[in-house]
Structure formats: C-alpha cells, structure tokens
Image (spheres, helix red, strand yellow):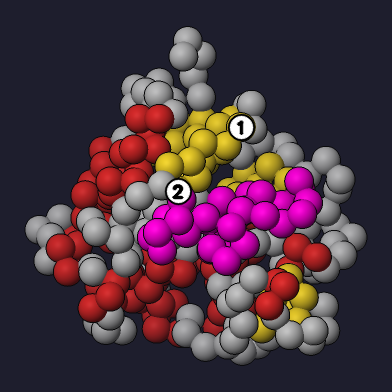
Amino acid sequence: MSDSQTLIVGDIQGCYGGLMALLEKAHFDEKRDRLIAVGDLIARGEDSYATIKYLMDLGDRFNTVLGNHDLHFLAVSQGIKSAKKSDRLGPLLDSKKLKDIIDWYRQFPLALALDETTTIVHAGLYPMWSPKTLLSLSNEVSTVLKGDKWRALLEEMYGNSPTEWKEALKGTPRLRFIINACTRMRFLQKQSHLEFACKSHPEDAPSSVTPWFEVENASLAASERIVFGHWAALEGVTGNNQFVALDTGYVWGNSLTAMRIPSNTLINVTP
C-alpha cells in the first residue's frame, strides 16, 4: 500500500499472535502507519507482555483509550486488587520494566477524538453526553491518573454507584461514574441508569434493559460516529453505522477486527 493508513483495532486482550496476524494481513507499516486500540490491550490472552512491549515500541505511532482490564491491571500492580490466574498477567507484573509500563499506561485517556466526527471509547457513549462532553470528562479522569493521587483513584474506582449521571456529582462518585460509563457500560435501565449485571447479546437480555446505543441521544449529531469495544457478544453488530463495535471476541475463539481509516473497511483474523 502506497498511502499511510490508520488502523483501529478491537480488544486485543494479550492475544499477541492474533495482533501480529492482523497487522500482517493489513500490511501495517510500523514506520508509516498508525495503530489505535479501543482498550483492553491485555488480560486472558497468551502473551500480554509481548503485546505491551510491541505497542510501547511503536512510540507515537500507537494510541489507545483505557479499558476496564487496563485499569484493573494498574490497580493490581499497586496491590489494590489481586490478579486472577485466568488473566495471565504474571509476566507483566514480574517484568523489570513494570514501572515503565505503569507510567506508559497512565498517559492514555478514557476517550479520544480521531477527527472531527469520530470518537473512540472502550465501552461507549453514555446517552446523556455529547462526544464533546465525553472528551471533557475523560480529561477529568486523566488529570488525576497522571497526577500524584492516581493510586487513590484506582482504590476508589471500584463499585457500581452512582448509576445515573448528574452534573452536580463531585469527587469519587463523579470520577467513578465516568470510569464506569467509559469502560464497563453495556445496558441501561430507565434510559439513563447504568446496569452491569447483564453482559449478553441484546436479543437475550431482559426487556427491562436497553443497549446504550439504542437509547436516544439528543446531543449526538447524525454525522458523528462512536467506535468502541468491550462487548464481544455483539459480534460487531449494532444495527447502526454511527456505532462501530470492534470487539469481536478473539480471546474467546472468534475474530480480531480492525477498521482501516479512511476507507472504513474492516479487516479480521481468526485463531
């Protein structure tokens, strides 16, 4: 390929072999092209350490938003939580470069703007927010994560409340809601309350919950697009071109998907 490309890749989850196969299929040029991830770079796959090393070595050719597994890894690295054996994080946690990895991770946001119309976030856009609001709230969390009180943020981020956004929220409740909406959201109750118990395909969900992308968002223009991951059960299908789901469950034996920009074509590989 003669022109440079940007690839937005779905949840890698430490599947280094799958990532390499996908980049080869896409003819990714490390010196010319850009790679952007939708979060959950690590956990559960066969080699989270090799995955992180490769992405770090890309330097400014790589960018990502943070997912729930990424934030959990940071908490585990500080002794706030214990690692699950199934997450296969041992080589990362035992690495001599652990401090560098932690500092690298802390620089990334919960949401980023690819261009004027496309916003990337791990779980999705909370329907009471515009993309501009999402980016502003992401910056609130990033400011703390990059600062001296980042460990306290990780200690306080666990929990399901509050479930509904109010602009008047302050302190820990405010930051926790932003993190939950950006990294854990799938379904909503009563159109605005985060619901975390259901992780299924929408067709298999109870009638009391609604996928976030099916709730009307008066602040989202028709020309704007949200690219997200997190929800493997969707198998990449939202039924609406405004909402591009890139987590297609490679770590579960399905496929790893990337979207090529600017053509918007999808590339995928299977194990």
Where disc 2 sits, the SS reads: strand
Pinpoint residue 248: horizontal percent, then vertical percent: 52, 55
Stretch in magenta: 227-255
Work out whether 112 lies above or below 27. Answer: below
Residue 265 - label: 1
- Residue in the picture at 57% in, 37% down: 266
Residue 256 - label: 2
Q: CA distance from mark 1 to mark 2?
A: 14 Å
Q: Is there any visible trace of residue 78 in the rendered image?
A: no
Which numbered disc, 1 or 2, marks the residue that appears first in the sequence? 2
> What secondary structure predominates along the stretch shown in magenta?
loop
| Residue in front for this viewpoint, 200 or 96 | 200
Work out whether 43 lies above or below 35. Answer: below
Q: Is residue 231 magenta?
A: yes
Residue 199 horizontal side relative to residue 77, left or right:
right
Q: Is residue 192 magenta?
A: no
Residue 214 horizontal side relative to residue 260, left or right:
right
Pinpoint residue 110: horizontal percent, then vertical percent: 54, 59
Q: Name the image quarter holding residue 41.
A: bottom left
| Residue in front for this viewpoint, 174 or 65 | 65
Pinpoint residue 56: horizontal percent, then vertical percent: 29, 43
